[in-house]
Amino acid sequence: MRKPTMNLAGPAARLFLGGVSLALATLALSLLRVNLAATAFVYLVVILLLSLVSGLATSALLSLIAAAALIYFFAPPIFDFRIEDPQDLVVVVAFLLTSLIGTHLFGKLRQEREGALETKAKLRRSEADLRDSEREWREVFEHNPVMYFMVDAAGTVLNVNTFGAAQLGYSVADLAGQSVLKVFLEEDQEFVRQCVAVCLEAPGQSHTWEVRKIRKDGSVLWVRENAKALRRADNQLIVLIACEDVTERKRTENALRQSEAYLAEAQHLSHTGSWSWDVHRREFIYRSAEVYRLFGFDPKEGAVSAQAFQARIPPEDLERVGEAASLAIRERGGQFEFDFRIILPGGPIRRIHSVAHAVVGSDGEVIEIIGTHMDVTEQYAAREALQKAFDEIKKSEDSLRLVIDTIPAQVWSNRPDGAAEFLNQQILDYAGLTMDQALGWGWTSVVHPDDLAGLLKVTRAAWTSRTGREAEARLRRVDGEYRWFLWRIRPLRDETGKITHWYGSATDIEDRRRMEVALRGSEQRFRDYAETASDWLWETGPDHRVTLLSEHAEAAGITAAGVIGLPRWEMS
């Protein structure tokens, strides 16, 4: 109940202040015996000044009170609400119309200024949102445990995530600006050039290859690279590469087969001009000085022809203004608004918002149109700037999301409690989920029931780790098939050591596991064969020393204790 009371108290106080001001002015003017026209001018000044701090309703009510005071105290017969002299009636009517239009225009000016302030505030908020969005996307890019490289058409590294650089034993600064070939073996560099060239020839298409990378310390790892060429906003092509460490799988394979209505000065300050158009004579009978200034004319140089004014309005805008005035005349009164442009000498353009009112005569026909022109160029510029800012935000956010969504790997980020707050498009497409379905704990619906408890247990264990954890769990594909994935989970901590986000990736290892099973089966079959063969068999290491001897050798009188470790040529 307190807020409505406060809202009513402001207008009531301003109405009281206005009434007191008019009363004091009336008393002073009566004592001085000022005539009706001068009194009307003083009242007009008082009301317009009060309208700077009052609402339209309060100002309109004060205008009516002032008009009544003019009639009662200053228009003969005094102390009577009758007007005998028609000229006095004209003064009162002119005062009332001017007062109402003036207070209306001051209200429009306040609205325009408030609108400009609100536009600036929105622009500042938009810039802050852009910075937050960029920071969030960069965190997703930087802290996922997958190696991400961004290279240009010449093969120069434009960016690399911290994890990827660290995996190779470098810092980001070590690799940025260098040739991507720096991290490849010399004999594989020509192969890498050819792969990047294929991506550049078909932008938007994903390509995959496997190649060796060399760490700073000289050690070698095998990687499976998923790459795609994209065209940036500047029309330059870049290649995004996600690298998956497949060294273990490679080792397994080798073992098996080897993202103017105001006062003149007020008009000048507010860039608002007033005018009056005589409908019957079809000409302007009044233009304030500010109207001249708005059109680029000097008001001190005298009258300027209507044709000169019209010549500075584009034809299509002039036609629209004429249609609005004609409609007001046909409808016999009412207020109407329209916007148009003024093209100044030299080419600058002003944007003008005009508010007009059709005055109806005693015969019921429109005799005059009174209105104002307000310079709203800055508001147009502010709106354009805001729209541009929104466009830039959208472009930046779309670009960042495109980078993450087009990375050919399954990545996500979670809140400290483990609930998902972001998943890239790759994992959503794989599992057949929408973002809403997957957020929170929805992602657990596609983890194999037998593997979920173990995966969550590894996540909880990572809370005390600074390097993250790995786990293997099955993930249901959109067609219902479960495949094994290697889940890598890494925490991001603040300066106090508190976890602020989790970042992770999932790598399909179904083929590797099948190979391992096949390898173990092959090894077991060999051992079974060896143990069941009638001949005795022996095995040596790279140094040709005996490492294994079958059981059948004892039948030949040769014991393991006697030959293990001996060069094979010394077996007797």
Image (cartoon, grey):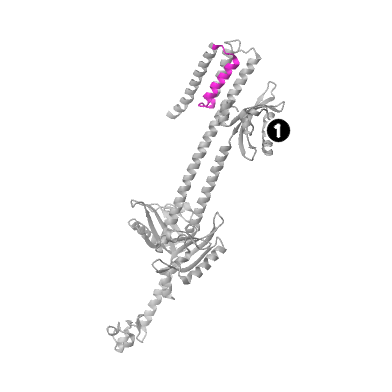
- What is the x, y in percent for residue 571? 31, 87
Is residue 568 positioned above or below 173 on the image? below
- What is the x, y in percent for residue 277? 67, 27
**Which is the main secondary structure of the residues drawn in magenta?**
helix
Label 1 sits on residue: 307
- What is the x, y in percent for residue 367? 69, 24
Inspect this view and state whether residue 480 appears.
no
Q: How many marks?
A: 1
Q: Secondary structure at mark 1?
A: helix
Is residue 157 positioned above or below 300 on the image? below
Is residue 144 part of the magenta span, yes or no?
no
Is residue 394 positioned above or below 511 on the image? above
Identity of the residue furthest to the front in this view:
301
- Left or right position of 93 against 491: right
Image quarter where the N terminus lies is top left
Q: Nearer the viewer, residue 74 or 468?
A: 74
Amino acid type, mark 1? Gln
Kindly indicate the quadrant of the structure image that contains residue 231.
Answer: bottom right
Look at the image and give the residue range highlighted in magenta. Answer: 32-57
